[in-house]
């Protein structure tokens, strides 16, 4: 009986609205506009059911997506802070380094704390947005890849260009000339790091070539997500490695100036690597979300 009464009440409300729209006449067009003027069916059902949710059904998927993106950035910053042995504070994030990084339990606990904080933050944001706008319209997040021949091939060529420069021209482009002698800015330790950078760039070229000729397929999107995670690992590995660019000791500069300059270069490189790590993390999350959407 209660369900029947609710249906009658909804029917009466729609007819009254249609009559108002149609100027006293109820026709199919007025009924259509009356139904469109009502709230989202899921929200109407929740209102009559009497159940309250922090995050409504319509906003639940965007909530999960934005929380996953926020947590990916947060966790990468925690790892960077741990490798750099210093906390990172970027409002509203507070990336605290892991005290004992060799303990897996400590890393897991810090990750759980970060996840709970990010969930709470996104709940607050979505709650205030929903209250501020009753007709909240969340965008459909598809994260499609520009998989056409031209954009994918352009990305592949850029990766190839970077590989050529790092392998064949780095000691010709990144140099310092002192007393008619050429000193490369890249240190000897970079030769060991370059092996893994070349492997990663080769995989990027293969992946982008596959996008160019095959388009946005499930397998390629999955490989793209894995590649993004490998990019995060590579950037974090490079952060804890010795700085691979520095001015040589032969530079004629005061004894204090040269170490300070090289220290600034090292901090700048670490900042660039952190930005790349965060970008790869975001890209990985978006690719895995896109993969799930393609399976639906």
Image (spheres, rainbow, N blue to C red):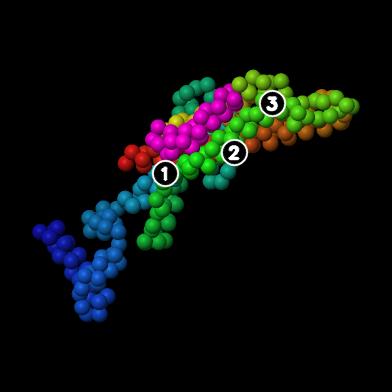
Disc 3 from disc 1: Cα separation: 42 Å
Screen quadrant of the N terminus? bottom left
Residue 182 in the image: state x and y as whole percent.
82, 26
Residue 247 in the image: state x and y as whole percent.
78, 29
Instruction: Identify the residue at horizontal 60%, vertical 26% (top origin).
Output: 197
Does residue 243 appear left or right of residue 75 in this picture?
right
Q: Earlier in the sequence, mark 3 or mark 1?
A: 1
Residue 250 visible in the picture: yes
Range of the magenta residues? 196-221
Check disc 3 and report the residue beneath it: 168
How packed is label 1: few (under 14 Cα within 10 Å), some, or many (20 or more)?
some
Residue 274 visible in the picture: no
Instruction: Identify the residue at horizontal 50%, vertical 33% (top origin).
Output: 209
Residue 119 in the image: state x and y as whole percent.
42, 43
Check disc 1 and report the residue beneath it: 65
Disc 2 from disc 1: Cα separation: 21 Å
- Label 2: state its secondary structure: helix
Image height of 28 relative to 88, above or below: below
Closer to us: 181 or 42: 181
Most extreme residue toward the left is: 1
Image-quadrant location for residue 239: top right
Residue 232 in the image: state x and y as whole percent.
53, 31
- Label 1: state its secondary structure: helix
Check disc 2 and report the residue beneath it: 275
Q: Main secondary structure of the magenta part?
A: helix
Closer to us: 206 or 8: 206
Q: Are marks 3 and 1 in contact (CB under 8 Å)?
A: no
Q: Earlier in the sequence, mark 3 or mark 2?
A: 3
Mark 3 or 1, which is nearer the eye?
3
């Amino acid at each position: 009986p209660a369900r029947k009464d609710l249906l009658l009440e909804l029917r009466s409300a729609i007819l009254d609205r249609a009559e108002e729209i149609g100027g006293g006449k109820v026709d199919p067009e007025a009924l259509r506009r009356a139904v469109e003027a009502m709230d989202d069916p899921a929200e109407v059902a929740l209102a009559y059911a009497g159940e309250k949710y922090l995050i409504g059904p319509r906003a639940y998927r965007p909530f999960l997506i934005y929380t996953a993106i926020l947590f990916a950035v947060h966790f990468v910053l925690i790892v960077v802070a741990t490798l750099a042995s210093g906390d990172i504070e970027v409002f509203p994030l507070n990336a605290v380094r892991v005290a004992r990084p060799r303990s897996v339990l400590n890393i897991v606990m810090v990750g759980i704390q970060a996840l709970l904080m990010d969930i709470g933050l996104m709940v607050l944001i979505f709650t205030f947005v929903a209250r501020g706008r009753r007709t909240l319209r969340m965008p459909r997040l598809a994260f499609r890849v520009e998989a056409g021949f031209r954009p994918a091939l352009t990305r592949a060529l850029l990766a190839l260009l970077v590989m050529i420069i790092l392998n064949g021209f780095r000691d010709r482009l990144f140099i310092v000339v002192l007393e008619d002698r050429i000193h490369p800015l890249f240190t000897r330790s970079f030769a060991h790091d370059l092996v893994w950078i070349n492997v990663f760039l080769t995989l990027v070229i293969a992946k982008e070539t596959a996008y160019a000729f095959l388009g946005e397929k499930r397998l390629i999107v999955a490989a793209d997500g894995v590649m993004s995670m490998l990019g995060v690992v590579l950037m974090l590995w490079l952060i804890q490695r010795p700085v691979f660019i520095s001015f040589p000791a032969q530079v004629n500069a005061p004894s204090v100036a040269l170490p300070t300059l090289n220290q600034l270069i090292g901090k700048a490189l670490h900042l660039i690597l952190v930005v790349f790590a965060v970008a790869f993390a975001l890209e990985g999350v978006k690719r895995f979300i896109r993969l799930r959407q393609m399976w639906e």
